[in-house]
Image (spheres, rainbow, N blue to C red):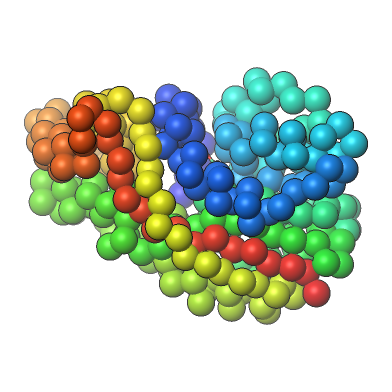
């Protein structure tokens, strides 16, 4: 995935995404159990929705380092101006960290995009002290996540030739089967426990706003690099409006979702 290409629509969508995923962040931080004084690495921090909570949890005696490959997203994260947070632009999977620098790693939907999973999880292992932790969220299968399966079905029905990404390659659903992630973690020296949770995504606004959000992110991601005409885009919008209306109740949209929450310890 080209996160630089995705950066502009992602920046526009970021505030609504942050509202949508509040329940996911809650599960992430419950798993992370961050403590005052700890040193934390936030992998794939993006625009930094998890940085304020991490910053508060570790307090003034602690420190948070956010790392992300997309410079525009890191620039947005920097606008949060948190005293005990520093940011890095780079590939979290291959960046050379000071060995044992971190007590814990957090990653909200940030560990599914490495080119070389074995190398990345080993590298992250080196970056924490013995007994250091990872808490991470990853999506379960598309079938259990209408947030993704609705746009995919609509594209299948409205636009010819939209490529289907390799389900095992870098992408949001690559660890839908949690045993794949558990295997990489174990091989890299992590003892992992992975729990699956049902959550509600709570995007702000009514169907129109949620469809606009999806046009930027999910449809945007799936249509990246394709030449799609205005008529097709209108058909997609129309179908998305019908589909997401089903999740609207009294003007509020709640989309059921399933995620895996990883808690791992470095041995
Ligand atoms: C789904 S977004 C999640 C962003 C953020 N954690 C959040 O919850 O909004 C995935 C993020 O991972 C970043 N990313 C992808 N591959 C990466 C890599 N190899 N190293 C660091 N960041 C990466 C992307 O730029 C993007 O910001």
Q: In the rendered view, tell whether residue 264 sits above or below residue 137.
A: below
Q: In the rendered view, tell whether residue 42 sits above or below residue 252.
A: below
Q: Mark yes or no: residue 98 visible.
A: yes
Q: Quadrant of residue 89?
A: top right
- Locate the C terminus by quadrant: bottom right
Q: Quadrant of residue 190?
A: bottom right
Task: Give the side of residue 116 with respect to residue 14, left or right.
Answer: right
Q: How many marks?
A: 0
Q: Nearer the viewer, residue 237 or 233?
A: 237
Q: In the rendered view, tell whether residue 6 sits above or below residue 32.
A: above
**Residue displayed at 71% across by 52% down:** 33
Task: Give the side of residue 12 with respect to residue 143, left or right.
Answer: right
- Residue 110 at x, y = what percent? 57, 50
- Residue 86 at x, y = what percent? 78, 33
Q: Mark yes or no: residue 110 visible.
A: no
List the single residue furthest toward the front.
Answer: 250
**Residue displayed at 27% across by 35% down:** 253
- Residue 153 at x, y = what percent? 18, 53
**Image quarter for ligand 1:** top right
**Residue displayed at 75% across by 39% down:** 57
**Residue displayed at 49% across by 71% down:** 178
Q: Nearer the viewer, residue 83 or 250?
A: 250
- Residue 100 at x, y = what percent? 88, 58
């Amino acid at each position: 995935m080209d996160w630089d290409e995705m950066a502009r629509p992602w920046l526009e969508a970021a505030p609504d995404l942050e509202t949508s995923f509040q329940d996911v962040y809650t599960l992430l931080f419950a798993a992370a159990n961050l403590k005052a004084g700890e040193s934390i690495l936030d992998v794939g921090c993006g625009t930094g929705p998890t940085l304020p909570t991490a910053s508060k949890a570790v307090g003034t005696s602690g420190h948070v380092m956010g790392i992300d490959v997309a410079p525009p997203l890191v620039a947005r994260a920097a606008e949060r101006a948190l005293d005990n947070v520093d940011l890095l632009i780079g590939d979290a999977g291959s960046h050379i960290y000071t060995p044992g620098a971190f007590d814990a790693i957090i990653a909200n939907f940030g560990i599914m995009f490495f080119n070389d999973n074995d190398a990345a999880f080993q590298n992250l292992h080196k970056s924490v002290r013995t007994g250091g932790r990872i808490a991470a969220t990853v999506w379960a299968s598309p079938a259990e996540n209408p947030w993704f399966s609705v746009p995919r079905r609509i594209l299948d029905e409205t636009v010819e030739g939209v490529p289907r990404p390799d389900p095992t390659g870098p992408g949001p659903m690559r660890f839908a089967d949690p045993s794949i992630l558990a295997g990489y973690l174990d091989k890299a020296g992590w003892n992992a426990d992975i729990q699956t949770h049902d959550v509600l995504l709570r995007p702000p606004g009514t169907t129109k706003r949620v469809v606009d959000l999806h046009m930027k992110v999910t449809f945007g991601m799936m249509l990246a690099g394709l030449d799609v005409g205005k008529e097709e885009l209108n058909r997609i919008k129309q179908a998305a409006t019908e589909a997401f209306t089903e999740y609207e109740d009294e003007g509020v949209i709640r989309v059921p979702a399933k995620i895996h929450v990883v808690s791992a310890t470095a041995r």
